[in-house]
Amino acid sequence: LVRLRSRLARSQNVFGKTMLALLSRDKLDDDTWDEVEETLIGADVGVAATTEIVERLRERARVLGTSSTSELRKLLADELTTALEPDMDRALKASPHDGRPAVVLVVGVNGAGKTTTCGKIARVLIADGHSVLLGAADTFRAAAADQLATWAGRVGAEVVRGPEGGDPAAVAFDAVKRGTETGVDSVLIDTAGRLQNKVGLMDELGKVKRVIERHGPVDETLLILDATTGQNGLEQARVFTEVVDVTGVVLTKLDGTAKGGIVIAVQRKLGIPVKLVGLGEGADDLAPFEPAQFVDALLG
Ligand code: GDP
């Protein structure tokens, strides 16, 4: 939590400070509420969610007849936490079962942080005593497989890669096969994020998924989303949810944006829980997403 706060603080400070300044005004008039609304929209919460949050906050403040800043902060924290849907199941399904490794498919546009996140997740699993194999199914750029291999070396995971330009599905198949044969606990498959057209993507990811399923089910399909790309990135990412059955979102680069409200928009628009957040480029810069803690860090 301390790290979450310090990492977010660098970029989120403005949001929390602006909010608290608004809520500590002597009079909460229409103008003030408009500014609260603008601040939330500015933080990428999204228009619909913002409207709801502000309406409820206003109503509760009115009913309670409260003007104390700390009480208002509490009400706001409460509304933001509710908007973050604290009851969603955020457990990462990355533990072996039925004598098979857990298989995690990692998808998202190029540059979102897929490879980095694979490395970070491997680090967490290995620290928990699991063995991990990383499959480099992004065969289009040699650099991508090299980068994944570097991560594997750094965190102590095995890596399976194919020839450059080879079939991504073949690599995914080999990775799960090897993981199954050697009794690895978790297999993480890094994929290519080329988004030129939906049909191509669907063909490619669909095939990757189908060949993996010859060994057994995909336990978790994680969509990696760059928080700094805001609402546009969200629209782009939606394609992935139409192509594969995404079970969780990892929101990366939250350390580099003042728009942490994007988490609310993501869950609301995609209907998929944010399970993890990326807070930097290092191996340990990954945290489970916990709504109440996040709101606390956000408000400073
Ligand atoms: P991929 O193309 O989706 O595999 O993306 P990469 O894993 O190669 O990441 C793209 C860039 O984003 C790299 O420079 C990473 O170091 C950086 N990156 C990934 N996650 C984070 C994060 O949580 N915070 C920050 N600041 N940078 C990140």
Image (cartoon, grey):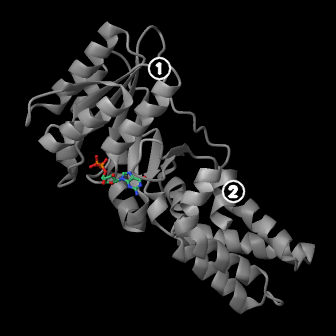
Give the answer, above or below, for where 211 lies relative to 220: above
For disc 1, the neighbor class at 10 Å (few under 14, some 14 to 19, many from 20) is some
| Dot 2 amino acid type | Thr
Residue at image mark 2: 81
| Dot 1 amino acid type | His
Disc 1 is placed on an element classified as loop
The answer to which image quadrant residue 63 occupies is: bottom right
Disc 2 is placed on an element classified as helix
Q: Is residue 28 visible?
A: yes
Q: CA distance from mark 1 to mark 2?
A: 32 Å
Report the side of 294 relative to 156 (left or right): right
Q: Residue at x 54, y 73 (%)?
A: 47
In this orientation, which residue lies closer to the viewer: 254 or 172?
Answer: 254
Q: How many marks?
A: 2
Q: Disc 1 or 2, which lies upstream in sequence?
A: 2
Residue at image mark 1: 130
Q: Residue at x 76, y 80 (%)?
A: 23
Work out which quarter of the rendered image holds the C terminus and state it: bottom right
Q: Residue at x 27, y 28 (%)?
A: 135
